[in-house]
Image (cartoon, rainbow, N blue to C red):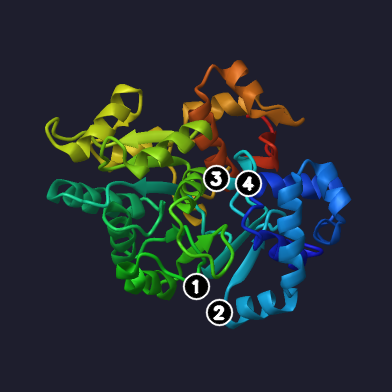
Amino acid sequence: MEGIEYLVALSHFQHFGPRRLKWLFNYFGSWEKAWSASGHNLSQVGLKNNLVEKFIEFRQKTKIETLLNYIQDHDIKLLDLEDKLYPSLLKEIYAPPPLLYYRGQLTAQSFTLPLAVVGSRKITNYGKHVCQNLVRELVNNNLTIISGLALGIDALAHEIALDNNGQTIAFLGCGVEQIYPRENHKLGGKILAQNGLLISEFPPQTIPFKTNFPRRNRLIAGASLGVLVIEAGEKSGALITARYGLEANREIFAIPGPICNKNSLGTNNLIKLGAKLISEAKDITNSLGLEEFKLKQQNKTLLPSSPDETLILKNLDVANCHINELVKSTGLDINVINSRLTIMEMKGLVKHLGNMQYIKLVSKK
């Protein structure tokens, strides 16, 4: 991306989140112009005077070269919204981060069949047993485990994925060179050593403020086909991830638990509200339409492998088609269509053109 160094600098100003960055780019047309804009022009974007003053003061104190040197010295890489490797599902959420920072190995397969696995930090023996069994089966079905490197369910999900030679990605609520919490420093290193990813929308040197974690949870949900909540209290942060998943039209899965256990109040309530009750990994793979799906090298045919895929292809014209149009024409739930289209794109049946627009790549059979 042209001018990405200015986007790096803008992202370091803590008051500029994804929405404000988008406003700035849309108004000025380039990150360089946004960075060097006058106070008057910044006010024209809609920024309040006190915020404009804070930004100008920040800009005067900031040396872009120093920021870039720090990034290079800590082996941090940049991923902008225009990059082909930017997670396709994450592009679909409202105001996706224009810039992500990451450490590790990012390839076209990194976000293959991503599933968020989240839950309580105060894990019970029941939760531990469920997590171990489910995650092992999920990675054996080629799903990538997405979580937040938190204590409890998150950390265990990453660990089990790695122990079973699976792919796992951790979204952080701080800079990617600062593994938080400290208890998971070794786990973070293990993720990097086994070709996983540590990724964040927060620039380097950002400390783990409490307010950062809901934003992190938003990305965990947005980058995934669905959100699996294994254990959660009534006010658990995992429920925030599930809520963001609903807003992004993702599948929500929940593990039922004993009604007298506080760690099951959140998951049981999710099920009451319509989340899919999960008792085995097959419940998830079936719901996502993976029962006949394997990795691309195992799936050479371009023929649809499920009735849902056949129906979608019949209603998907060679012209651009928005996902909302497919919901109307097929009668399928938007969550089902969303997950099927992701899989169909991997199989070469359709292509995502951005902004929820799809096009068919094969002729009708």
Could you tell which of marks 2 and 4 lies nearer the N-terminus?
A: 2
Between the C-alphas of marks 3 and 2, the distance is 43 Å
| Residue type at the position of mark 3 | Thr
| Near-viewer residue (98 or 113) | 98
- Image coordinates of residue 138 in percent, x first then y, are 33, 49
**Element under label 1?**
loop
| Residue type at the position of mark 1 | Glu
Residue positioned 57% across, 57% down in the render: 201
**Element under label 4?**
loop
**Residue to which mark 2 is pinned:** 74
**Element under label 2?**
loop
Q: Which of labels 4 and 3 is toward the front?
A: 4
Could you tell which of marks 1 and 3 lies nearer the N-terminus?
A: 1
| Near-viewer residue (191 or 267) | 267
- Image coordinates of residue 165 in percent, x first then y, are 34, 65
User: Crowdedness of circle 2 by 10 Å Cα count: few (<14), some, many (20+)?
Assistant: few
User: Crowdedness of circle 1 by 10 Å Cα count: few (<14), some, many (20+)?
Assistant: many
